[in-house]
Image (cartoon, helix red, strand yellow):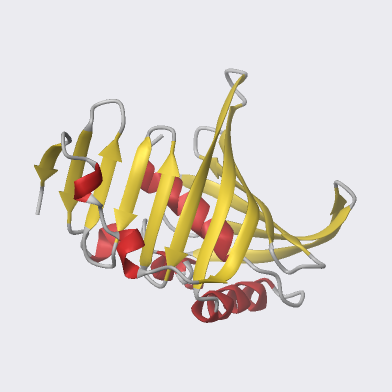
Amino acid sequence: MNLKFLFCLVSLSISLFAYGQDARAILDKASETYNKSGGITAQFTLDVKDVRNKMTYSYDGSIKMKGNSYRMEIPEGITWFDGETQWVYMSDSEEITINTPDENELGGVSPAALFNVYKTGYNLKYKGMKIVESRSVLEVEMTPTKKSDFSKIIILLDKTTNLFSKITIVDKSGIENIVSIRNMKTGVDLPDSVFSFPKDEYPEVEVIDLR
């Protein structure tokens, strides 16, 4: 899966805390909470379900986030973004691609941008509370009002902890991308160096600089 798209799924998932029973209030609280949360670390599982072809695959990963910076690791590789420069390392090819995302590109990878994505271009609907795996969760549905790769986004949030439980993104072909976050911690002390490519640790890597 495209690393940029995956980061979009994961960072959007982490950002969604529950507050009240109004969909917009829930997401407003998510943005506010993120801005006050400091560093965030979490593990996640991505399940991709192709309902039409009856195929499913999944893998685990981890992410660290602070402000507009992040570091995400999945079996395919690692992505770093320090707020200006992005490095994408692919483990199978031993290559590192460097670029400077513009404002449009940041809309798909930047935590700060993602936390505001719901403000325009989506119909928001609070679907109520339900019991999932013995837990009370709040459900919010986001439906795009303009051209999008997604048909809808379904969010489940733990009513007790106000933390993300699960997010399902359904694309136009019917494929379901389900992200489950676990072991999330906020207020973590993350030095800026975490979000930059440590070139000394990869002396043999091939560098593709697109800046």
Q: Residue at x 61, y 64 (%)?
A: 185
Residue 141 position within the rendered picture, expressed as x and y whole percent measured from the top left = 65, 58
Q: Using the rendered image of the protein, determine whether residue 146 is visible from the camera's viewpoint.
A: yes
Q: State left or right for residue 72 relative to residue 25.
A: left
145 over 209 or under it: above or below: below
Give the residue drawn at x 17%, y 49%: 98
Q: Is 156 placed above or below 59 here?
A: below
At x 42%, y 50%, the residue is 72
| Residue visible at 53% across and 81% down in the picture | 36
The residue nearer to you, when weighing 149 against 41, is: 41
Q: Position of residue 42 (x, y in %)?
A: 56, 55
Q: Quadrant of residue 127?
A: bottom right
In this view, the residue in front, 97 or 49, is: 97
On the image, the x and y values in percent for residue 10 come to: 51, 52
- Rendered location of residue 3, percent (x, y): 37, 42
Query: Which of 189/165 is in front?
Result: 189
In screen coordinates, is 191 left or right of 88? right
